Each structure stands twice: as C-alpha cells, then as structure tokens.
Amino acid sequence: MKLLTAAQTREADAATIREEGISSAELMERAAFAFVTWLQVRLSPAADTQVLVLCGPGNNGGDGLAAARLLHQQGYLVQVGLLPADRHSADWEVNRARLPAELPVAEWQPEHFPAISPNTVVVDALFGTGLSRPLEGTAAALVQHLNAAQARVVSIDVPSGLFADAPQPVGSAVVKARYTVGFELPKLALLLPQNAEFVGRWHVVPIGLSPRYLADVPASMYLADAALLAGRLPARATFAHKGTFGHALLLAGSRGKVGAAVLAAQACLRGGVGLLTVSVPAVGYAVLQSTVPEAMCLPDDCKTHLTNLPELRPYAAVGMGPGIDQADDTRAVLEELLCTAKAPLVLDADALNLLGANRSLLDLLPPSTILTPHPKEFERLTEPAQHDYHRLELLRGFARHYRCYVVLKGAYSCLATPDGQLYFNTTGNPSMATGGSGDVLTGLLTALRADKRLSALDAVLIGLYAHGRAADIAVADTGQAGLVAGDLPRYIGQALQELTTPDSL
Ligand SMILES: NC(=O)C1=CN([C@@H]2O[C@H](COP(=O)(O)OP(=O)(O)OC[C@H]3O[C@@H](n4cnc5c(N)ncnc54)[C@H](O)[C@@H]3O)[C@@H](O)[C@H]2O)[C@H](O)CC1
Ligand SMILES: [K+]
C-alpha cells in the first residue's frame, strides 16, 4: 500500500469525484459513514453514550458534522461544538444545514469553553490534512482544554494540530487522541514514534478512492502489508533440495554473548535456509552444537571473540554481528569480510557499531548489503537526528549513498532502499522490545538472502514482515510480557507460510 502526502490525498479526492461523477459532499458523506460505522462497533449502546463532536471550519469539520448527524440518527446523545471561524468550506456549509434542528449545536467561545466530562466520547474534527500552520489562539486553547479533560478522543483523519506528513514545532497544540481513524490510506505522521502520544491507535477505513489514481500516483513510501507482499515468496518446488535454499554463514557470539549466536542460528534455520554454518569463538562451540544441532559450527581459534574469517566460497549469504563485541581483531574480520565477500551480507548489532566507530569501513560496504540498526546504532553511523522526519531523510540518504538496504528497527520498522524508497513494516508488537529479537531478525534475513529465488528487496521485506508476524502469532501463547526472543524462531515458519504463494494455475 502506498503512503500518500496530504497534497496527493487531495488529488485522490479530486480524481474520485471526477471519475465517479459524484459531488464532493457525496465523498464527504462516504467518509463520515465509514467513520461512524467504525466507531459504532466500539461504542456502548447508543442511548447510554454521550458523544461530543468538535468541528473546525474546513472539510475535516464537515466530516464531523456529517458524522454527528449519522450518530444522532442511530440514537446516540450527540452534541456539536463549533470552533468560531469567519469562513467555512462549502461542504461544511452543506452539512451544517443538514443537522437536524433538535441536535444541540453551540459555537465554543474561548472565554468559557464548556466542561468536557471524562465519560464523553469526543470526536475530534477540528483540523485534518488542510492544516497549514501550527494552531494558535482559540484553536490552540480548545485543543489544550480537550487534552486536559482526559476524555476518550477519536480523531477524524489526523489528530487536530498534527501535520500529516511534516514535523511541527515542539510544543505545538495537538489533540491527544485515543484512536485516529483515517481514510483509505494512513498518513506518514501516524507511523512516527514522536507522534505516538497524539495518534493513539490508528485505523484506516476504505472510502473507495479512485483505484486508478492510487495505482498511477508515484510514491516513494509504502506500507509493507500482506497485500504488498502477496505472491512474493514462492512455494517450494517438489524436487527442491538443500542447495536450492542456499548455504548461509553466520559470524556471531563472543564470551558472555553466545546466546546471540544461538538465536540467530535458530532463526536462520527456521527461515528456511538449506544449510547453515556458524562461526563462533571457541567458548561457544559446545553451546552451539548442543542447542542447534542442525547447524554446522566453525570454532574460532580464539576463545573469547572472533578473530578469523572463514573461507567464504561455499556461502550464498553471510550474516555478521549478533553478540560479536567490538574487539580490534573482530573489526579486522569485518574489514576482510567487506573487502572479499562476493555473497550478499547482512550486518547487525556490533558489526554496525564497529562500522560506526571506524567510518572509513563504510566505503567498503558491498552494494545491496543489508544493515539493521536500531535508532541509536543508526545515529552512530550518521549523526543525531533532530526529529523523526529528519531521521528518515538521513536513512534515505545513507541507503542511497552506500547503495544498501537499511532497516531502522522499531515499531513500523522502516526499510530504505538504494533507490531511495521507504517501506514501513506493519507487523510486530511491543513484545519484541526484548533482548535478542534483533539477533533473530539477523538470522532470518541471512536465510532469506541465501535463497536465490528472492531479490534483495523481497528478502528484506519478507524477513521484516515475518519477524513481526512471528511475534504477533507468538503472543497469543506467551502474552506480550512473557515473550522471549527464543520463542520467535518457532513461529517464523508459520509467518512465512502465510506469505507463500499457493501452487495454482
Ligand atoms: N480522502 C479523504 O481523505 C477525504 C478527506 N476529507 C476530509 O477533508 C479534510 C481536509 O479538509 P480541508 O478543508 O482541506 O482542511 P481542514 O479541514 O484540515 O482545515 C482547513 C481549514 O482550516 C484552516 N486552517 C489551516 N490551518 C489552520 C490553523 N493553523 N489555524 C487556523 N485555521 C487553519 C484553513 O485555512 C481551512 O479553512 C481531511 O482531513 C478529511 O477529514 C473529505 O471529507 C473526504 C475525503
Ligand atoms: K482531526
């Protein structure tokens, strides 16, 4: 699914209206109906529920007015509060006129905003994608008043005061919603950690925007969801053998961190690799052989950390980083790997920290290498970001410059590609904020890179998706707090199966 800018969303509206021969008010009615349908499922019975709809002067306010009417028709106890304004959009006027006379409507004056009871469900329809500057004056005061009330707020399209796809000054007045319900496609702002306190949980509801426009519009940002990935993981052929899925090498572990090697190895095997060899410091040899018997093990001469790069010729992909620590001779192994590898690479954890501490190594990165930093690791590779949008630009620039695939890990992990595209992963949950889940991702990505049937892009997208999906499936058994990284590999197969194209004509 593409992510559109606010400007592209307006074009999508216009294209839909033109192509379907409908009025803009009809599109607004569709949007309001979709919103109300979503809301009703989550509200208590109509007669017990007070709903306050706060409406701004534009089409977001128009959506709110239409939603107020529809909720009133369903029997909810609805009131409307209007933000005072000199001018209103045409469709706002249409929907203002359609409000039934018995539905209470008041203009909310700044000197005496009515109290908002915490039991009220507030629909925030003050501002949407038309926000052109940070809120101030009465609008800002109303947002502060609403936030202070601690009511259950559901924002239409975006929390009012939040730009849909650009940063706003720190301290701007923005509604703190419990839910945000957008139309057709999510806006970038909903995916960024800095906006989490405003957005709450978000959902998008379909409103039938022009499929032609959505297919044709150029985009540089995507949501990597099941629809985007459908058909990208081929089924296994009947006569497939170990060689079909490649032989992977993992360079992992150091004294006290052999577990990272075990987790990466388990995930690599569950990711479907044909053969796996793991190079660990001697201290990890017995551990690895007993916990992951399916893997072959190359013990390093050194007991505590990696000091030798194995002969690389047999391997279809190499992953390096989990638990390796940052000793100088391990840095030398990394440097030799970068200089000599012909197979695709996956670099994580201390391999990234070594790159960050020795920036000249970055120029040795083979094209299409996959790097999987979390924000702190990424900062060590680049510079501190001023905000999330800046971080995304750094990410895009880094991936372009080094012609690599860079995954910024977190909620909605973001993949930047060598050609400057951004893909936001849609799976996963907070259970993954636990030691070792990154090691699992490294192993899984290394397996998928060893599979010659997959492009680099598909391998990363499928790996990210399946990693998160494994956690989503696992928490049904473990609960979120109870999930440990070692649980994840067991669910990877199921997650991958969901993406596998069935054999069909
Ligand atoms: N496909 C869709 O997503 C649909 C979206 N709809 C809704 O329309 C809004 C966008 O409406 P628009 O009229 O363009 O903008 P807003 O309602 O967000 O506000 C514009 C209004 O406010 C003024 N303004 C802007 N910034 C400020 C400010 N800082 N302070 C005061 N006033 C401000 C501006 O001048 C305008 O007058 C979208 O979010 C959806 O909710 C459609 O209903 C259907 C399809
Ligand atoms: K809003």
Image (cartoon, rainbow, N blue to C red):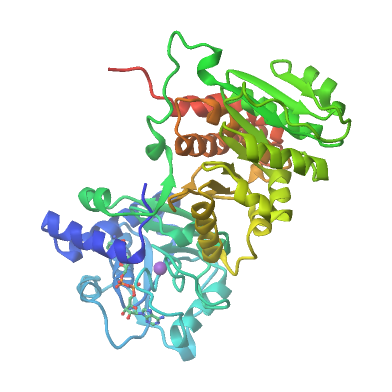
Seen as rendered, the residue at the extreme left is 21
Q: Nearer the viewer, residue 258 or 343?
A: 343
Which residue is at a point 31% across and 17% down the rendered structure image?
504
Image quarter where the C terminus lies is: top left
Percent across and percent down for residue 354 are 73, 49
Percent across and percent down for residue 262 are 74, 28
Q: Quadrant of ligand 1?
A: bottom left
Q: Nearer the viewer, residue 277 or 132?
A: 277
Residue 491's quadrant in the figure?
top right
Residue 446's quadrant in the figure?
top right
- The reply to whether residue 327 is in sight is no
Q: Does residue 168 sit above or below 335 in this rendering?
A: below
Q: Nearer the viewer, residue 356 or 17?
A: 356
Which residue is at a point 46% across and 39% down the rendered structure image?
457
Percent across and percent down for residue 65 are 30, 69
> Relative to 30, is 493 on the left or the right?
right
